Each structure stands twice: as C-alpha cells, then as structure tokens.
Image (cartoon, rainbow, N blue to C red):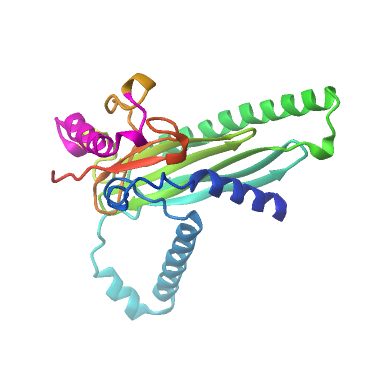
Amino acid sequence: MTQSGKQQLDQLRQEYRKTELPPELPYAVRAAFLKARRPRRMVRRLVTAAACLFLAFLAALNLSPSFAQAAAQTPLIGPLAEVLTFTEYHVATDREFIDVRVPEITGTSFPELEDRINKEIQEKIDEDLTAARTRAKEEYEAYIATGGNPEDYIPLTISFDYEVKSCTEKILSFELERFEVRASGFTDLTYYNIDLTTGKTLTLADVLGPDWKKKADAVVQAAIDAHPENFFTAEMGGFTGVSEDQRFYMNSDGNPVLVFEKYEIAPGSSGELEFEVPIGE
C-alpha cells in the first residue's frame, strides 16, 4: 500500500474508533465503565521492545556460558505464549485499499489448540477478504458502467488487524479486528480468551461463575440506569441482557471486559462500549 493509502486508512480508523462520547456523559461514569482502547501503534512498539529483549537474552545464552548456567537454574513462570504476526501484506488499487496483519499463536504447550485457532483465524480472514474484494470489484465496475469518473472513485478500505489484550502465565487474551469503510465505517471484533493451564477457550461462565449472567447484566444495567439518555431503550433494540456469545476479553487485572460494538446498545456517537466486570464482586 502506498504511504498516502496507509495514511488514509489510519485516518479513517481513528475517526471511526475515536468518536467522542456525548458531552453530557460524566467522566466518573466513563472511568468506571467505558475503557479507552490502547493505541495499536503503542502496542506494536511494546511488542517490538519485548522481542528485542528476548533476542538479547538468547544472545547472552549463546555468548556467556555462566549466564546460560544461571538462566537454566531460574524457573520459568508458565508457558512462553506469544501472538506473532504470521503474515502481513498491503494492496492498493483503483477500487480497494487492503491492510492485513494475520496473527499466529505459539508457545502455549497445546499445539492442537494453536493449530485450531490459527487455522480458524486464517480461514475467517480469507473468507471475509474474498467477500469484501468481490464487493469492491462489483461496486467499481457498476460505478464505471454508469459513467463514473475513475479518478473520482473512492476505493473500498479493508483492514484486518489484531491486538493483545493481556498475556500472563495463566491467560492469553487477544482481539481480531476487521475494519471496512465504503459509504460508512464497519467494524467486526472477535475475541480469543485462552486458559494457558488447560488449553481451554474461556467463557464468561468460566471466569465469573454460575451466576455470570447476573453479574454481567448488573454492571451494564448500572451504567444505563445512571444515564439512560445515552443508550437505546429495550424497545429500540437496546440492552436486554448479555448473551451466551457475548464479546469479551480479559484485561491485565484479570477481569473480563464486555464489548458492545457501535450502534449495538447505544447511538453511534458513543462508539464501541466496554464494561469491566470485577471478578471479586
């Protein structure tokens, strides 16, 4: 992708993801329930720094026998689970801008789990990207066929990216994002929450216990009750309770964070909403 294409993609994503919340929503409520997303570029810097430290560690093992002996006597704290960029590519044509980073899980001590999730992610990206590129081709051809000027055509923007939410000796949690812009922006989020001690994909019931739904509903409903004007009513298709397939990720504090996409339970001006559910409560 050209530099101008990537700049346009970054700008579109930022405008869509960073839409300001309504000014009447008090900061205290936002601080308690709505968690700001960490800039992906910062995450990439941290991952790069961690990789550099790891390479330095490997170099020390190879160059210093005494260091290697000392390291061998230091117990490891759980599996060395990682989410790495398996494939990255960029395409820019008259009809589409494509920006893709495909993640791959490694080092979990559960190779079958890694293979299953990595295959699932790759298949999802391939399927969604094929469908999006087909739409882009059809829209472009229809535009030209009806007399449109190719120089005035705005290409379809398609992006796939990921973000690690937390990684400890017990849990790995990361987000796969599909971002698409044509006449308007669209985001699809998929979360993977893995118990690194068992190899199991975590559910809210695993994390919050048998009354998981009651706990999760209470947190979301408390925010709605405090400022109902900022949310859709139930009659308008708003919040009626968390579902079995509710999107969530695990944060660095070990708490699940419920995620509602734009327009799901509130006007688009609210953006994506996140509600942390403390496990201890």
Residue at the spot x=84%, y=23% of the render?
Answer: 145
* Vertical arrangement, residue 78 with respect to residue 67, above or below: above
Which of 275/99 is in front? 275
Q: Is residue 217 left or right of residue 42?
A: left
x then y, percent, for residue 181: 61, 37
Q: Is residue 204 left or right of residue 121?
A: left
Q: Is residue 84 left or right of residue 273?
A: right
Q: Is residue 231 magenta?
A: yes
* Vertical arrangement, residue 43 with respect to residue 223, above or below: below
Q: Is residue 40 left or right of residue 252?
A: right
Residue at the spot x=71%, y=53% of the render?
Answer: 4
Using the rendered image of the protein, determine whether residue 271 is visible from the camera's viewpoint. Answer: no
Quarter of the figure with the C terminus: top left
Q: Which residues are magenta?
A: 207-233
Q: Is residue 43 magenta?
A: no
* Rendered image quadrant of residue 263: top left
Q: Main secondary structure of the magenta part?
A: helix
Residue at the spot x=19%, y=34% of the render?
Answer: 218
x then y, percent, for residue 179: 55, 39
